[in-house]
């Protein structure tokens, strides 16, 4: 049975980009600060990821001293950050590996708790025709594919941005789901990378590449996958800077 993502992996430059991302993340996990002190660096990575992801969607990056975050986008991103760290992350990984759609619903609940007027819509896909079907197909693909993890993360990220399955907080969910793929696959088991910083610095390129993926054109889909792998590679560099600071 043909792997559903094999045609994407075979596009020019995609496998090489995935290999570079894998190597960069493996190297940062070998950093001396991350051999035993990774919980500290992972916690810092989670905060940086949350602030950057919020800013990509127009949210604030300011975390008040008292911890009372007024901006609903940042608040959602920080809740996701907490769910992608420590014991909570292990629980979410388990859900993702068994039932990806349940994990996505959980991420949306965290992302959009302050964004929707009716809490009954939290975690529920939009009722428009085709949304649930495409989500089901995405979940089946995630569970069936043997494609390199950076490619799977790119597809999950791009499909959720294109589909906007919940109608609110979809960008936060898409970036968090991509991050979850990297952890669950063992690509970035301690969630040390911070690709969200890359996306924030290149917001227009991010939007353009996401549109290319949504078009379904092979060049656009391949370009998106390569850019996502580049974000993971850049995120490993951000992780290295965190580890360097922790090591003193």
Image (spheres, helix red, strand yellow):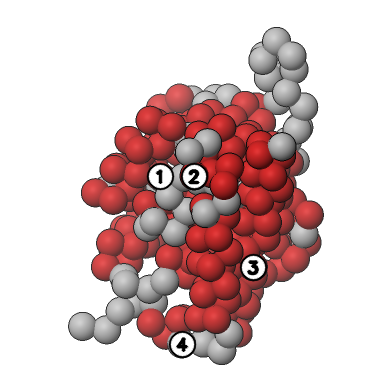
Image quadrant where residue 124 sits? top left
Tell me if mark 2 has few (under 14), some (14-19) or many (20+) residues whose alpha carbon lies within 10 angstroms of its own.
few
Q: Which is in the foreground here, disc 1 or disc 4?
A: 4
Q: Secondary structure at mark 1?
A: helix
Residue 51 at what x, y percent from top left? 69, 37
Residue position for label 1: 104
- Assign the N terminus to one quadrant of the image: bottom left
Residue 166 at what x, y percent from top left? 48, 44
Q: Secondary structure at mark 4?
A: loop
Residue position for label 2: 35
Dots 2 and 3: beta carbons under 8 Å?
no
Total marks drawn?
A: 4
- In the figure, 189 relative to 41: above or below? below
Dots 2 and 4: beta carbons under 8 Å?
no
Q: Which mark is residue 41?
A: none
Residue position for label 4: 10
Q: Which is in the foreground here, disc 2 or disc 4?
A: 2
Q: Which is in the foreground here, disc 2 or disc 1?
A: 2
For the residues labelled 2 and 3, the Cα–Cα distance comes to: 24 Å
Q: Is 178 displayed left or right of 115 in the figure?
A: left
Q: Is 177 displayed left or right of 207 in the figure?
A: left
Q: Secondary structure at mark 2?
A: helix
For the residues labelled 2 and 1, the Cα–Cα distance comes to: 30 Å
**Residue 63 in sight here:** yes
Q: Which is in the foreground here, disc 2 or disc 3?
A: 2
Which residue in the rendered view is the most extreme toward the top? 66
Q: Secondary structure at mark 3?
A: helix
- Which is nearer the N-term, disc 1 or disc 4? 4
Residue position for label 3: 230
Dots 1 and 3: beta carbons under 8 Å?
no
């Amino acid at each position: 049975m043909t792997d559903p993502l094999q045609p994407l992996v075979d596009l020019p430059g995609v496998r090489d980009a995935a290999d570079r991302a894998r190597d960069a993340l493996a190297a940062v996990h070998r950093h001396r600060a991350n051999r035993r002190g990774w919980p500290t660096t992972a916690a810092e990575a989670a905060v940086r990821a949350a602030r950057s992801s919020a800013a990509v969607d127009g949210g604030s990056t300011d975390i008040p001293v008292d911890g009372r975050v007024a901006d609903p986008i940042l608040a959602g991103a920080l809740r996701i950050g907490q769910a992608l760290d420590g014991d909570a992350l292990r629980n979410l990984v388990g859900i993702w590996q068994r039932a990806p759609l349940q994990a996505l619903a959980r991420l949306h609940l965290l992302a959009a708790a302050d964004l929707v007027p009716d809490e009954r819509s939290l975690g529920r896909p939009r009722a428009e025709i085709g949304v649930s079907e495409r989500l089901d197909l995405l979940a089946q693909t995630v569970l069936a594919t043997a494609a390199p993890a950076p490619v799977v993360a790119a597809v999950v990220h791009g499909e959720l941005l294109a589909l906007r399955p919940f109608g609110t907080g979809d960008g936060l969910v898409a970036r968090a789901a991509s991050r979850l793929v990297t952890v669950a696959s063992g690509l970035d088991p301690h969630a040390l990378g911070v690709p969200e910083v890359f996306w924030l610095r290149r917001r227009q390129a991010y939007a353009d590449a996401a549109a290319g993926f949504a078009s379904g054109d092979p060049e656009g889909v391949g370009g998106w996958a390569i850019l996502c792998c580049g974000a993971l590679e850049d995120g490993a560099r951000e992780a290295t800077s965190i580890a360097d600071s922790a090591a003193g």
